[in-house]
């Protein structure tokens, strides 16, 4: 594969239409300004939303689209006003590259909820320039959206922290699902779920995994350290969990019933949805009122808390369990991801 030539010529893989096939694509990024960090991309995680977006399943796709928002690389150039990074640093960019910095969400450090947020791909900067993601050799971003990657973390296995990791970390912090000795439940053991289990164990919680796949039990217990595993299709096993779980993170992106999980919550229990099923989900209000239970939702996380998560992962040696593929096999990654044939995240090796 060709290296980027010159400062602004980039090689990547792009989808040209909703068939979603990724093909080699040469493009230029916007010129780097004084506040920008330019970096050579080394690894990029493959998120389920990449698959949705290349196929226009969210009905807002812009083509050509270079996906990828779990991007890690080495700084090659910094603008004159950049203060946090220098050439040679290992850095990352997640789902966002721009926001207004003036609205209520931005002031609260929740840039992901800014109405003017610009996503790392399939979006446009305020001047209309399109954004392209990390399935490419080079990235340019405002330093406010660039994250420092702790040196002790492997660069490939750290990449999915930038979306999968922060998506579960943010609600676990915001809703106080980080209490030593508390009982934590995880619904849906995939890319997001396996990060939630690792965080919950690091916080000292007792972890129960709810999954439709009995085949996942052995690994969940032995590799991820889960304390308990419940096959969610087993109604008796679910009933046995009634009022026994303090906090639940639900990562399921397909339509499913929430009632068995709300029933599993203790009084004052909290449940947060991070998956985005395309259909409405029903809740019986009495199931909430009869125990002051909370059902909430959350999307990725702000920049400050993403850095806090990365630093915590560095201190506790937490990374994702990944399978590496060369960038040229990104279509294979998509095909296998569609069949859930991945443990637990594909990461593309951009240089090979
Ligand atoms: Zn993602
Ligand atoms: Zn804003």
Image (cartoon, rainbow, N blue to C red):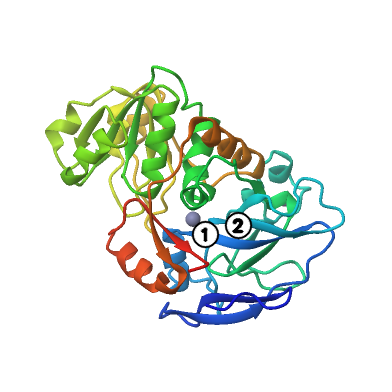
Question: Is the residue marked by circle 2 packed among few (<14), some (14-19), or many (20+) residues within 10 Å?
Answer: many
Q: Residue visible at 53% across and 71% down?
A: 60
Where residue 140 appears, as percent x and y from the top left, is: 70, 63
Q: Residue visible at 24% across and 42% down?
A: 211
Is 1 drawn above or below residue 76 in the view shown?
A: below
Whether residue 58 is visible to the viewer of this picture, yes or no, is no
User: 32 or 253: nearer the eye?
Assistant: 32
Is 194 drawn above or below residue 159 in the view shown?
A: above
Where residue 115 appears, as percent x and y from the top left, is: 67, 55
Res 309 → quadrant: top right
Question: Is the residue marked by circle 1 packed among few (<14), some (14-19), or many (20+) residues within 10 Å?
Answer: many
Q: Which mark is residue 88?
A: none
Where residue 47 appears, as percent x and y from the top left, is: 44, 58
User: 28 or 120: nearer the eye?
Assistant: 28
Where residue 141 appears, as percent x and y from the top left, is: 71, 59
Residues at circles 2 and 1 in contact by the CB criterion of under 8 Å: yes
Disc 1: which residue: 43
Disc 2: which residue: 73
* Residue with the most extreme right position: 80
Left or right of 270 on screen, residue 188? left
User: 203 or 56: nearer the eye?
Assistant: 203
User: 204 or 233: nearer the eye?
Assistant: 204
C-alpha separation, residue under disc 2 versus residue under disc 1: 7 Å
Whether residue 88 is visible to the viewer of this picture, yes or no, is yes
Helix, strand or loop at label 2? It is strand
């Amino acid at each position: 594969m060709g290296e980027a030539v010159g400062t602004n010529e980039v090689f990547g893989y792009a989808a040209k239409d909703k068939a979603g096939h990724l093909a080699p694509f040469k493009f230029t990024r916007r010129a780097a300004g004084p506040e920008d960090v330019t970096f050579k991309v080394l690894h990029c995680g493959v998120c389920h939303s990449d698959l949705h977006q290349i196929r226009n399943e969210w009905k807002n796709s812009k083509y050509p689209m270079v996906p990828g928002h779990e991007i890690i690389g080495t700084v090659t150039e910094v603008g004159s006003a950049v203060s946090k990074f220098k050439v040679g640093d290992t850095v990352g960019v997640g789902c966002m590259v721009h926001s207004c910095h003036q609205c209520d969400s931005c002031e609260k450090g929740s840039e992901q909820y800014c109405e003017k947020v610009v996503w790392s791909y399939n979006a446009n900067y305020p001047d209309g320039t399109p954004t392209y993601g990390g399935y490419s050799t080079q990235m340019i971003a405002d330093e406010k959206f660039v994250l420092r990657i702790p040196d002790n973390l492997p660069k490939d296995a750290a990449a999915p922290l930038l979306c999968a990791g922060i998506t579960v970390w943010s609600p676990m912090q915001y809703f106080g699902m980080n209490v030593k000795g508390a009982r934590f439940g995880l619904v849906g053991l995939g890319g997001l779920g396996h990060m939630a289990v690792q965080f919950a164990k690091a916080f000292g919680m007792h972890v129960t995994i709810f999954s439709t796949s009995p085949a996942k039990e052995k690994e969940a217990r032995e590799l991820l350290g889960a304390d308990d595993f419940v096959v969610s299709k087993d109604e008796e096993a679910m009933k046995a969990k009634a009022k026994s779980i303090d906090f639940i993170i639900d990562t399921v992106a397909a339509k499913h019933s929430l009632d068995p999980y709300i029933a599993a919550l203790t009084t004052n229990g909290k449940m947060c949805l991070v998956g985005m099923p395309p259909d409405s989900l029903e809740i019986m209000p009495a199931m909430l009122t009869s125990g002051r239970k909370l059902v909430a939702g959350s999307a990725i996380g702000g920049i400050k808390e993403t850095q806090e998560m990365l630093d915590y992962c560095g201190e506790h040696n937490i990374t994702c369990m990944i399978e590496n593929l060369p960038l040229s096999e990104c279509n294979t990654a998509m095909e296998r991801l569609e069949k859930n044939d991945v443990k637990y995240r594909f990461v593309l090796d951009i240089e090979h």
